[in-house]
Image: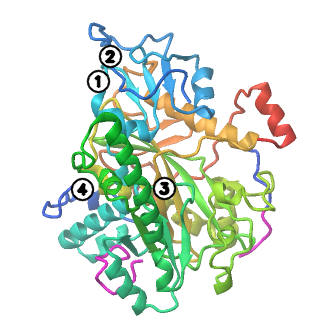
Amino acid sequence: MSNLRDSSQSSRFSDRSSISTIPTDTMSSSQSINASVVRNTYSSAPSGPLCAPLRVREHENRDDGPRKDVIRFRSSLRNTICDVMRDRGWKETDSDTDWDFFWADVHWLHEFFDKSYFSEFQRLNHFRNHYELTRKDLLVKNLKRTLRAVEREHGAEAASKFDFVSQSFSLPSEHALFSEEFKRTPGAVWIMKPAGRAQGRGIFLINKLSQANGWKRAGADKKRITASSSSLASKRDGRDSKGSKSTTALDQEEEDGVEAYIVQRYIANPYLIGGKKFDIRAYVLVTSYTPLTAYLHRNGFCRFSNTQFSMNARDISNLYIHATNVAIQKTAPNYSPSKGCKWLLRSLKRYIGTHRGEEAAETLFSQMEQLVVRSLLSVQKVMINDKHCFELYGYDILVDDNLKPWLLEVNASPSLSAETPWDYDLKHAVLNDMFDIVDLEREHVSHKGPRTKVGGFDLIYNDGPVHREGSPGGHVSFLGCHCPIVEAPKSKRRKERWATGSN
Protein backbone atom coordinates (compact mmCIF):
# COMPACT_ATOMS: atom_id res chain seq x y z
CA MET A 1 0.00 0.00 0.00
CA SER A 2 2.60 2.50 1.03
CA ASN A 3 6.11 3.51 0.09
CA LEU A 4 6.90 3.79 3.80
CA ARG A 5 5.95 0.27 4.80
CA ASP A 6 8.60 -1.84 6.49
CA SER A 7 11.51 -2.38 4.13
CA SER A 8 11.13 -6.14 4.45
CA GLN A 9 7.89 -6.02 2.48
CA SER A 10 8.06 -6.41 -1.26
CA SER A 11 5.51 -3.71 -2.08
CA ARG A 12 6.77 -0.53 -3.73
CA PHE A 13 8.26 1.88 -1.13
CA SER A 14 8.44 3.83 -2.77
CA ASP A 15 3.39 19.13 -21.48
CA ARG A 16 6.49 20.79 -22.61
CA SER A 17 7.47 24.33 -23.46
CA SER A 18 10.65 26.35 -23.33
CA ILE A 19 11.63 27.63 -19.92
CA SER A 20 11.44 31.39 -19.70
CA THR A 21 13.10 33.59 -17.14
CA ILE A 22 11.38 34.12 -13.84
CA PRO A 23 8.83 36.93 -13.68
CA THR A 24 9.91 39.81 -11.49
CA ASP A 25 6.70 40.11 -9.96
CA THR A 26 10.35 10.31 19.28
CA MET A 27 7.34 8.30 20.00
CA SER A 28 8.28 4.65 20.64
CA SER A 29 6.70 1.97 18.51
CA SER A 30 4.75 0.76 21.54
CA GLN A 31 3.12 4.15 22.02
CA SER A 32 -0.27 4.79 20.52
CA ILE A 33 -0.43 7.63 18.06
CA ASN A 34 -2.96 10.28 18.91
CA ALA A 35 -6.02 10.15 16.72
CA SER A 36 -5.55 13.83 15.98
CA VAL A 37 -2.56 12.93 13.80
CA VAL A 38 -5.09 11.54 11.36
CA ARG A 39 -8.08 13.70 12.17
CA ASN A 40 -6.12 16.94 12.10
CA THR A 41 -4.17 16.46 8.87
CA TYR A 42 -6.93 17.31 6.43
CA SER A 43 -9.17 14.89 4.86
CA SER A 44 -8.37 15.48 1.26
CA ALA A 45 31.59 34.15 10.11
CA PRO A 46 31.05 35.99 13.28
CA SER A 47 32.84 39.00 14.69
CA GLY A 48 33.63 37.19 17.93
CA PRO A 49 34.60 33.62 18.82
CA LEU A 50 31.92 30.97 18.44
CA CYS A 51 33.87 28.09 19.91
CA ALA A 52 32.37 28.35 23.39
CA PRO A 53 28.89 28.03 24.89
CA LEU A 54 26.89 31.25 25.13
CA ARG A 55 26.12 32.10 28.74
CA VAL A 56 24.05 34.81 30.37
CA ARG A 57 25.93 36.90 32.90
CA GLU A 58 25.54 35.43 36.33
CA HIS A 59 24.02 38.55 37.88
CA GLU A 60 22.29 39.93 34.79
CA ASN A 61 18.53 40.18 34.96
CA ARG A 62 17.17 39.99 31.40
CA ASP A 63 13.65 38.83 32.26
CA ASP A 64 12.20 42.20 31.35
CA GLY A 65 12.84 41.31 27.71
CA PRO A 66 15.04 42.90 25.09
CA ARG A 67 14.99 46.62 24.64
CA LYS A 68 12.43 47.44 21.97
CA ASP A 69 14.64 50.06 20.35
CA VAL A 70 17.80 47.94 20.08
CA ILE A 71 17.97 44.21 19.31
CA ARG A 72 21.45 42.76 19.66
CA PHE A 73 22.30 39.83 17.41
CA ARG A 74 25.06 37.37 16.65
CA SER A 75 25.35 35.34 13.48
CA SER A 76 27.37 32.40 12.21
CA LEU A 77 26.62 33.43 8.61
CA ARG A 78 27.54 36.50 6.60
CA ASN A 79 24.88 36.62 3.91
CA THR A 80 21.29 37.78 3.49
CA ILE A 81 20.39 37.04 7.11
CA CYS A 82 22.81 39.68 8.41
CA ASP A 83 21.48 42.22 5.92
CA VAL A 84 17.91 41.61 7.10
CA MET A 85 18.80 42.07 10.76
CA ARG A 86 20.73 45.26 10.05
CA ASP A 87 17.90 46.57 7.87
CA ARG A 88 15.59 46.11 10.86
CA GLY A 89 17.87 48.36 12.90
CA TRP A 90 19.39 45.54 14.94
CA LYS A 91 22.96 45.86 16.16
CA GLU A 92 25.58 43.13 15.84
CA THR A 93 27.51 42.16 18.93
CA ASP A 94 30.44 39.87 19.63
CA SER A 95 29.48 39.47 23.28
CA ASP A 96 28.98 35.96 24.60
CA THR A 97 26.31 37.20 27.00
CA ASP A 98 24.69 40.45 25.93
CA TRP A 99 22.65 39.40 22.92
CA ASP A 100 18.98 38.93 22.13
CA PHE A 101 19.17 36.71 19.06
CA PHE A 102 21.76 34.27 17.72
CA TRP A 103 21.61 32.86 14.19
CA ALA A 104 23.65 29.74 14.89
CA ASP A 105 24.83 27.04 12.54
CA VAL A 106 23.96 23.42 13.31
CA HIS A 107 27.55 22.56 14.18
CA TRP A 108 27.50 25.04 17.07
CA LEU A 109 24.13 23.67 18.11
CA HIS A 110 25.32 20.07 18.34
CA GLU A 111 28.44 21.06 20.24
CA PHE A 112 27.25 23.73 22.66
CA PHE A 113 23.46 23.91 23.01
CA ASP A 114 23.32 21.65 26.06
CA LYS A 115 26.13 23.64 27.71
CA SER A 116 24.49 27.03 27.25
CA TYR A 117 22.03 28.91 29.41
CA PHE A 118 19.55 31.35 27.93
CA SER A 119 17.68 34.20 29.56
CA GLU A 120 13.93 34.53 29.26
CA PHE A 121 13.85 36.46 26.01
CA GLN A 122 16.91 35.21 24.14
CA ARG A 123 16.06 33.40 20.92
CA LEU A 124 17.86 30.84 18.76
CA ASN A 125 17.13 29.67 15.21
CA HIS A 126 17.23 25.88 15.73
CA PHE A 127 15.51 23.29 17.87
CA ARG A 128 17.85 21.07 19.86
CA ASN A 129 17.18 17.84 17.94
CA HIS A 130 16.10 19.26 14.61
CA TYR A 131 17.85 16.30 12.95
CA GLU A 132 14.81 14.10 13.68
CA LEU A 133 13.28 15.96 10.74
CA THR A 134 16.30 17.13 8.76
CA ARG A 135 18.46 13.99 8.66
CA LYS A 136 17.22 11.89 5.78
CA ASP A 137 17.45 8.55 7.58
CA LEU A 138 15.74 9.80 10.74
CA LEU A 139 13.00 11.50 8.75
CA VAL A 140 12.22 8.21 7.01
CA LYS A 141 12.36 6.35 10.33
CA ASN A 142 9.87 8.74 11.93
CA LEU A 143 7.54 8.63 8.94
CA LYS A 144 7.62 4.81 8.90
CA ARG A 145 6.73 4.69 12.58
CA THR A 146 3.89 7.14 12.14
CA LEU A 147 2.52 5.29 9.12
CA ARG A 148 2.53 1.97 10.98
CA ALA A 149 0.73 3.53 13.95
CA VAL A 150 -1.87 5.20 11.78
CA GLU A 151 -2.48 2.02 9.78
CA ARG A 152 -2.82 -0.02 12.97
CA GLU A 153 -5.33 2.35 14.56
CA HIS A 154 -7.14 3.91 11.60
CA GLY A 155 -6.63 1.64 8.62
CA ALA A 156 -4.82 1.60 5.31
CA GLU A 157 -6.68 4.53 3.77
CA ALA A 158 -5.68 6.90 6.55
CA ALA A 159 -2.10 5.61 6.47
CA SER A 160 -1.88 6.21 2.72
CA LYS A 161 -1.92 9.96 3.41
CA PHE A 162 1.62 9.58 4.75
CA ASP A 163 2.77 7.95 1.52
CA PHE A 164 4.93 10.78 0.18
CA VAL A 165 8.50 9.46 0.48
CA SER A 166 9.93 7.06 -2.07
CA GLN A 167 10.82 3.53 -0.95
CA SER A 168 13.87 3.92 1.29
CA PHE A 169 16.52 1.87 3.06
CA SER A 170 19.16 3.03 5.53
CA LEU A 171 22.73 1.89 5.00
CA PRO A 172 24.53 0.10 6.45
CA SER A 173 21.79 -1.17 8.80
CA GLU A 174 19.34 -2.25 6.06
CA HIS A 175 21.81 -3.29 3.38
CA ALA A 176 20.55 -6.90 3.31
CA LEU A 177 16.93 -5.77 2.97
CA PHE A 178 17.87 -3.39 0.19
CA SER A 179 19.73 -6.15 -1.66
CA GLU A 180 16.62 -8.34 -1.55
CA GLU A 181 14.39 -5.56 -2.87
CA PHE A 182 16.90 -4.67 -5.58
CA LYS A 183 16.88 -8.25 -6.86
CA ARG A 184 13.07 -8.32 -6.84
CA THR A 185 12.88 -5.26 -9.10
CA PRO A 186 15.51 -5.68 -11.82
CA GLY A 187 16.00 -2.64 -14.00
CA ALA A 188 14.98 -0.14 -11.34
CA VAL A 189 17.16 2.89 -10.71
CA TRP A 190 18.03 3.94 -7.17
CA ILE A 191 19.57 7.09 -5.76
CA MET A 192 22.15 7.07 -2.96
CA LYS A 193 22.26 10.04 -0.57
CA PRO A 194 24.44 10.73 2.47
CA ALA A 195 22.02 10.90 5.40
CA GLY A 196 23.51 14.02 6.95
CA ARG A 197 24.74 16.11 4.04
CA ALA A 198 23.04 18.77 1.92
CA GLN A 199 23.36 20.63 -1.40
CA GLY A 200 23.58 17.36 -3.34
CA ARG A 201 27.00 16.49 -1.95
CA GLY A 202 27.80 12.78 -2.17
CA ILE A 203 24.71 11.66 -4.13
CA PHE A 204 24.84 9.23 -7.05
CA LEU A 205 22.47 6.99 -9.01
CA ILE A 206 22.81 3.24 -9.40
CA ASN A 207 21.26 0.51 -11.55
CA LYS A 208 23.61 -2.29 -10.48
CA LEU A 209 23.86 -3.69 -6.98
CA SER A 210 27.65 -3.51 -7.03
CA GLN A 211 27.43 0.26 -7.48
CA ALA A 212 25.78 0.59 -4.09
CA ASN A 213 29.08 -0.18 -2.40
CA GLY A 214 30.23 3.37 -3.03
CA TRP A 215 29.03 4.32 0.44
CA LYS A 216 31.34 1.66 1.90
CA ARG A 217 34.39 3.17 0.26
CA ALA A 218 33.44 6.63 1.47
CA GLY A 219 32.87 5.25 4.95
CA ALA A 220 36.23 3.50 5.00
CA ASP A 221 38.01 6.71 4.06
CA LYS A 222 36.10 8.61 6.71
CA LYS A 223 36.89 5.96 9.32
CA ARG A 224 40.62 6.29 8.70
CA ILE A 225 40.43 10.07 8.97
CA THR A 226 38.26 9.94 12.09
CA ALA A 227 40.56 7.45 13.80
CA SER A 228 43.59 9.60 13.05
CA SER A 229 41.87 12.77 14.29
CA SER A 230 40.64 11.08 17.47
CA SER A 231 44.12 9.78 18.24
CA LEU A 232 45.64 13.24 17.87
CA ALA A 233 42.91 14.82 19.98
CA SER A 234 43.38 12.24 22.73
CA LYS A 235 47.10 12.92 22.87
CA ARG A 236 46.47 16.65 23.13
CA ASP A 237 44.03 16.57 26.04
CA GLY A 238 44.94 13.28 27.72
CA ARG A 239 41.59 11.59 27.10
CA ASP A 240 41.19 7.90 26.46
CA SER A 241 40.84 7.40 22.70
CA LYS A 242 37.55 5.57 23.16
CA GLY A 243 35.91 8.46 24.99
CA SER A 244 32.34 8.20 26.24
CA LYS A 245 29.63 6.58 24.18
CA SER A 246 27.16 8.98 22.60
CA THR A 247 23.46 8.30 22.29
CA THR A 248 22.45 10.25 19.19
CA ALA A 249 22.61 9.03 15.62
CA LEU A 250 25.01 11.83 14.79
CA ASP A 251 27.41 10.93 17.56
CA GLN A 252 27.16 7.22 16.81
CA GLU A 253 28.07 7.85 13.20
CA GLU A 254 31.12 9.82 14.31
CA GLU A 255 32.18 7.00 16.64
CA ASP A 256 31.78 4.30 14.00
CA GLY A 257 33.56 6.36 11.38
CA VAL A 258 31.03 5.14 8.79
CA GLU A 259 28.95 7.68 6.95
CA ALA A 260 25.30 6.70 6.96
CA TYR A 261 23.57 6.66 3.59
CA ILE A 262 19.99 6.35 2.53
CA VAL A 263 19.10 4.64 -0.75
CA GLN A 264 15.76 5.46 -2.34
CA ARG A 265 13.92 4.25 -5.39
CA TYR A 266 14.52 6.94 -7.99
CA ILE A 267 11.38 8.69 -9.24
CA ALA A 268 11.79 8.02 -12.94
CA ASN A 269 8.71 9.92 -14.15
CA PRO A 270 9.16 13.50 -12.95
CA TYR A 271 6.88 16.22 -14.26
CA LEU A 272 8.92 18.04 -16.89
CA ILE A 273 8.77 21.60 -18.14
CA GLY A 274 10.64 22.27 -21.34
CA GLY A 275 11.90 18.70 -21.12
CA LYS A 276 13.78 19.48 -17.93
CA LYS A 277 13.46 18.19 -14.39
CA PHE A 278 12.82 20.54 -11.48
CA ASP A 279 12.15 20.42 -7.78
CA ILE A 280 10.45 22.84 -5.39
CA ARG A 281 11.89 24.73 -2.43
CA ALA A 282 9.22 25.75 0.08
CA TYR A 283 9.87 27.72 3.27
CA VAL A 284 8.30 26.46 6.50
CA LEU A 285 8.56 28.21 9.86
CA VAL A 286 7.91 26.31 13.09
CA THR A 287 7.64 28.45 16.21
CA SER A 288 6.63 25.63 18.55
CA TYR A 289 6.25 21.85 18.61
CA THR A 290 4.17 21.88 21.82
CA PRO A 291 1.67 22.82 20.61
CA LEU A 292 2.67 22.44 16.97
CA THR A 293 2.55 25.87 15.35
CA ALA A 294 3.68 26.11 11.74
CA TYR A 295 3.65 28.63 8.90
CA LEU A 296 4.15 28.16 5.15
CA HIS A 297 5.41 30.97 2.93
CA ARG A 298 3.60 31.66 -0.33
CA ASN A 299 6.80 32.50 -2.19
CA GLY A 300 8.80 29.35 -2.75
CA PHE A 301 10.55 28.60 -6.01
CA CYS A 302 11.38 25.86 -8.52
CA ARG A 303 14.95 24.86 -9.39
CA PHE A 304 15.53 23.49 -12.89
CA SER A 305 18.26 21.28 -14.25
CA ASN A 306 20.40 22.58 -17.10
CA THR A 307 20.08 19.46 -19.24
CA GLN A 308 17.18 17.67 -20.92
CA PHE A 309 15.88 14.82 -18.78
CA SER A 310 16.81 11.29 -19.78
CA MET A 311 16.57 7.86 -18.20
CA ASN A 312 19.05 6.30 -20.62
CA ALA A 313 21.55 4.07 -18.87
CA ARG A 314 24.43 6.07 -20.32
CA ASP A 315 23.14 9.19 -18.54
CA ILE A 316 22.76 7.67 -15.10
CA SER A 317 25.90 9.34 -13.77
CA ASN A 318 25.05 12.78 -15.19
CA LEU A 319 23.97 14.81 -12.17
CA TYR A 320 23.26 17.82 -14.37
CA ILE A 321 20.26 15.79 -15.56
CA HIS A 322 19.16 14.18 -12.32
CA ALA A 323 20.06 16.63 -9.52
CA THR A 324 18.46 20.05 -9.43
CA ASN A 325 20.49 21.43 -6.51
CA VAL A 326 21.91 24.85 -7.34
CA ALA A 327 25.26 23.81 -5.84
CA ILE A 328 25.51 21.13 -8.55
CA GLN A 329 23.87 22.95 -11.44
CA LYS A 330 26.05 26.04 -11.08
CA THR A 331 29.10 23.93 -12.01
CA ALA A 332 27.56 23.05 -15.40
CA PRO A 333 29.36 24.63 -18.38
CA ASN A 334 26.15 26.23 -19.65
CA TYR A 335 24.86 27.46 -16.28
CA SER A 336 23.55 30.99 -15.99
CA PRO A 337 21.45 32.12 -13.00
CA SER A 338 19.62 34.63 -15.20
CA LYS A 339 18.43 32.15 -17.85
CA GLY A 340 15.41 30.47 -16.37
CA CYS A 341 17.00 28.17 -13.78
CA LYS A 342 14.44 29.27 -11.20
CA TRP A 343 10.72 29.99 -11.23
CA LEU A 344 8.59 31.44 -8.49
CA LEU A 345 5.91 29.01 -7.35
CA ARG A 346 3.14 31.19 -8.71
CA SER A 347 4.63 30.72 -12.19
CA LEU A 348 4.54 26.95 -11.71
CA LYS A 349 0.96 27.14 -10.47
CA ARG A 350 -0.09 29.12 -13.54
CA TYR A 351 1.76 26.73 -15.86
CA ILE A 352 0.14 23.62 -14.39
CA GLY A 353 -3.24 25.35 -14.37
CA THR A 354 -2.85 26.05 -18.09
CA HIS A 355 -1.64 22.58 -19.07
CA ARG A 356 -3.44 20.31 -16.58
CA GLY A 357 -6.33 22.47 -15.39
CA GLU A 358 -6.82 24.82 -12.45
CA GLU A 359 -8.38 22.12 -10.27
CA ALA A 360 -5.32 19.89 -10.74
CA ALA A 361 -3.03 22.77 -9.82
CA GLU A 362 -5.02 23.60 -6.69
CA THR A 363 -5.05 19.94 -5.64
CA LEU A 364 -1.29 19.64 -6.07
CA PHE A 365 -0.50 22.72 -4.02
CA SER A 366 -2.95 21.65 -1.31
CA GLN A 367 -1.27 18.22 -1.18
CA MET A 368 2.13 19.87 -0.79
CA GLU A 369 0.87 21.82 2.21
CA GLN A 370 -0.61 18.66 3.74
CA LEU A 371 2.71 16.89 3.13
CA VAL A 372 4.44 19.57 5.20
CA VAL A 373 1.96 19.26 8.06
CA ARG A 374 2.11 15.47 8.18
CA SER A 375 5.90 15.42 8.17
CA LEU A 376 5.90 17.80 11.15
CA LEU A 377 3.31 15.68 12.96
CA SER A 378 5.51 12.61 12.46
CA VAL A 379 8.29 14.21 14.53
CA GLN A 380 6.23 16.31 16.93
CA LYS A 381 6.41 13.87 19.83
CA VAL A 382 10.17 13.35 19.53
CA MET A 383 11.13 17.01 19.13
CA ILE A 384 12.48 18.75 22.21
CA ASN A 385 10.39 21.88 22.42
CA ASP A 386 12.05 24.99 23.82
CA LYS A 387 10.52 28.45 24.06
CA HIS A 388 13.87 29.98 23.09
CA CYS A 389 13.82 28.19 19.73
CA PHE A 390 12.17 28.46 16.35
CA GLU A 391 13.29 27.07 13.00
CA LEU A 392 13.04 27.96 9.33
CA TYR A 393 13.08 24.81 7.18
CA GLY A 394 13.69 24.45 3.47
CA TYR A 395 11.40 21.72 2.13
CA ASP A 396 12.50 20.09 -1.13
CA ILE A 397 9.62 18.51 -3.05
CA LEU A 398 9.49 16.70 -6.40
CA VAL A 399 6.35 16.46 -8.52
CA ASP A 400 5.87 13.40 -10.73
CA ASP A 401 4.03 13.21 -14.03
CA ASN A 402 0.84 12.23 -12.21
CA LEU A 403 1.10 15.49 -10.21
CA LYS A 404 1.87 13.62 -7.01
CA PRO A 405 4.25 15.48 -4.67
CA TRP A 406 7.17 13.57 -3.14
CA LEU A 407 9.20 14.82 -0.20
CA LEU A 408 12.91 14.67 -1.02
CA GLU A 409 14.37 16.18 2.15
CA VAL A 410 14.03 18.89 4.76
CA ASN A 411 16.88 21.34 5.26
CA ALA A 412 17.65 22.84 8.67
CA SER A 413 19.86 25.46 7.05
CA PRO A 414 18.32 26.41 3.69
CA SER A 415 20.64 28.48 1.55
CA LEU A 416 20.35 32.19 2.22
CA SER A 417 22.90 33.24 -0.37
CA ALA A 418 21.60 34.99 -3.48
CA GLU A 419 22.79 34.87 -7.08
CA THR A 420 20.48 37.45 -8.62
CA PRO A 421 18.58 40.54 -7.42
CA TRP A 422 15.19 38.76 -7.45
CA ASP A 423 16.69 35.82 -5.53
CA TYR A 424 17.99 38.24 -2.93
CA ASP A 425 14.66 40.08 -2.70
CA LEU A 426 12.80 36.77 -2.23
CA LYS A 427 15.04 35.52 0.57
CA HIS A 428 15.18 38.93 2.20
CA ALA A 429 11.36 39.03 2.26
CA VAL A 430 11.05 35.49 3.68
CA LEU A 431 13.51 36.28 6.47
CA ASN A 432 11.93 39.64 7.23
CA ASP A 433 8.49 38.01 7.45
CA MET A 434 9.98 35.34 9.72
CA PHE A 435 11.27 37.97 12.15
CA ASP A 436 7.87 39.70 12.10
CA ILE A 437 6.37 36.43 13.38
CA VAL A 438 9.10 35.77 15.95
CA ASP A 439 8.60 39.38 17.10
CA LEU A 440 11.75 40.04 19.08
CA GLU A 441 10.75 43.70 19.13
CA ARG A 442 7.69 42.59 21.14
CA GLU A 443 5.30 44.69 19.09
CA HIS A 444 2.51 42.08 19.15
CA VAL A 445 2.70 40.73 22.69
CA SER A 446 -0.92 41.73 23.29
CA HIS A 447 -2.13 39.55 20.40
CA LYS A 448 -3.81 36.38 21.63
CA GLY A 449 -2.42 33.33 19.88
CA PRO A 450 -0.46 33.17 16.62
CA ARG A 451 -1.46 35.51 13.81
CA THR A 452 -2.97 33.75 10.80
CA LYS A 453 -1.09 35.76 8.15
CA VAL A 454 2.15 37.70 8.45
CA GLY A 455 3.66 38.99 5.23
CA GLY A 456 3.92 36.00 2.91
CA PHE A 457 3.57 33.46 5.73
CA ASP A 458 0.22 31.74 6.33
CA LEU A 459 -0.52 29.80 9.50
CA ILE A 460 -1.10 26.20 8.40
CA TYR A 461 -1.24 24.41 11.75
CA ASN A 462 -2.03 25.66 15.25
CA ASP A 463 -2.50 22.64 17.51
CA GLY A 464 -4.82 21.50 14.73
CA PRO A 465 -5.50 22.32 11.07
CA VAL A 466 -6.25 25.91 10.17
CA HIS A 467 -9.55 26.16 8.31
CA ARG A 468 -10.17 28.96 5.85
CA GLU A 469 -13.63 30.32 5.20
CA GLY A 470 -15.15 29.62 1.83
CA SER A 471 -12.80 26.78 0.94
CA PRO A 472 -13.89 23.19 0.18
CA GLY A 473 -13.76 21.20 3.39
CA GLY A 474 -12.52 24.28 5.22
CA HIS A 475 -9.07 24.10 3.65
CA VAL A 476 -7.27 25.63 0.73
CA SER A 477 -3.58 26.29 0.32
CA PHE A 478 -2.22 29.76 -0.35
CA LEU A 479 1.10 28.28 -1.44
CA GLY A 480 1.97 29.75 -4.81
CA CYS A 481 -0.61 32.53 -4.56
CA HIS A 482 0.39 36.03 -5.59
CA CYS A 483 2.54 37.67 -2.94
CA PRO A 484 4.41 40.83 -3.98
CA ILE A 485 8.14 40.82 -3.28
CA VAL A 486 9.30 44.22 -2.10
CA GLU A 487 12.68 45.25 -3.41
CA ALA A 488 15.11 44.97 -0.52
CA PRO A 489 17.89 47.43 0.28
CA LYS A 490 21.09 46.31 -1.40
CA SER A 491 24.64 47.36 -0.80
CA LYS A 492 26.51 49.14 -3.60
CA ARG A 493 29.05 46.32 -3.67
CA ARG A 494 26.37 43.66 -4.17
CA LYS A 495 24.76 45.62 -7.02
CA GLU A 496 28.11 45.94 -8.75
CA ARG A 497 28.75 42.20 -8.45
CA TRP A 498 25.35 41.36 -9.96
CA ALA A 499 25.89 43.88 -12.75
CA THR A 500 29.17 42.21 -13.72
CA GLY A 501 27.80 38.69 -13.19
CA SER A 502 30.50 37.95 -10.62
CA ASN A 503 28.18 37.10 -7.73
> Where is mark 4, residue-wise?
36
**For residue 457: magenta?**
no
Answer whether labels 3 and 1 touch (C-beta < 8 Å). Answer: no
The residue type indicated by label 3 comes to: Arg
> Where is mark 2, residue-wise?
56
Mark 4 or 3: in front is: 3
State the separation of the CA atoms marked 3 and 1. 29 Å
Mark 4 or 2: in front is: 2
**Which of these two is toward me, 439 or 444?**
439
Q: Quadrant of residue 498?
A: top right
Answer whether labels 2 and 1 touch (C-beta < 8 Å). Answer: yes
Secondary element at tag 3: loop
Q: Which of the two labelled residues, at mark 4 and mark 3, occupies the earlier sequence position?
A: 4
Magenta range: 1-19
Disc 4 crowd, CA 10 A, few/some/many (<14, 14-19, 20+): few
Secondary element at tag 2: loop
> Where is mark 1, residue-wise?
117
> Where is mark 3, residue-wise?
197
Answer whether labels 4 and 3 touch (C-beta < 8 Å). Answer: no
User: x, y (%) of residue 89?
Assistant: 58, 16
Disc 1 crowd, CA 10 A, few/some/many (<14, 14-19, 20+): some
